[in-house]
Amino acid sequence: MALNRFTGTTRPARAARMGTAAAAVAVGLAGTFAAPAAAAEFKNGFSEAVALGPSLADHVRAQAEAQHAAADAQADKAKKQAEKKAEAERGSDRADRSAARAAFVAPVKGGDVTTPYKSGGAMWSSGKHSGIDFAAATGTPVNSIGEGTVVTAGWGGAYGNNIVVEHEDGTYTQYGHLSKIGVGVGEEVGKGEEIGKVGSTGNSTGPHLHFEARSTAAYGSDMDPVSYLRDKGVPLS
């Protein structure tokens, strides 16, 4: 304490007065930011610590929750992108399998087309050839040009031993004059699968394969087999 030379009374030292003022300010701030928590503890007139008030704690908690929400949103976005990519890959695989199923092959390997479609002559009851002929030796494998279901397998009059296959696109193909039939009605056949052997049964002058493309299983619904095969990517010599 200091002696007042005029009155003879003592007064607080300057440091003590400053400490009291600082304490008052600290208490005021603590009351603003930390109420109703304990404001502060003092030593030598200076604040030692101020407790966090609920408003600041709430702010920190809100920031943490916002960060968690952002992380969850990012993870969800990444998951959706991965699922989208996986679905695209599955779609690509399905398209590849579909393209493979849709592919067609020639009914005989290496056979040249001899008698063309719609050529005239007395050999045919309609006066015109309803298909095309592939030159091949007896016993040459005859293949289904594509996947399908056998709807006819047996004797076909002028066609001799013949097979008719219904394909997935709703068209039909016929294979005539066979020496051997290797499938039965209702059987599923694959692209390029052997279904019989070349022969010369029925109304035939020598071994060859008579091939027809049809819009139905019945005679008389024939289509141009050359255009039909070429449209399906089968080259003809």
Image (cartoon, rainbow, N blue to C red):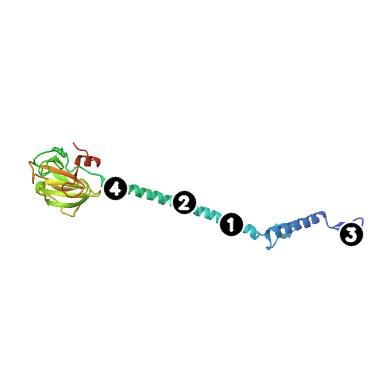
**Residue drawn at (30%, 46%) of the image:** 96
Give the alpha-carbon distance from disc 1 to disc 2, as whole Å.
Answer: 22 Å
Q: Position of residue 184 (x, y in %)?
A: 15, 54
Q: Is residue 16 left or right of residue 136?
A: right
Give the alpha-carbon distance from disc 1 to disc 4, as whole Å.
Answer: 53 Å
Q: Which residue is mark 1?
A: 62
Which numbered disc flags the more N-terminal residue, 2 or 4?
2
Q: Nearer the viewer, residue 16 or 224?
A: 224
Give the alpha-carbon distance from disc 2 to disc 3, as whole Å.
Answer: 77 Å
Q: Which residue is mark 2?
A: 77
Give the alpha-carbon distance from disc 2 to disc 4, as whole Å.
Answer: 31 Å
**Residue drawn at (38%, 50%) of the image:** 87
Which numbered disc flags the more N-terminal residue, 1 or 4?
1
Which numbered disc flags the more N-terminal residue, 3 or 1?
3
Q: Which residue is mark 4?
A: 98
Count of marks placed on residues: 4
Which numbered disc flags the more N-terminal residue, 1 or 2?
1
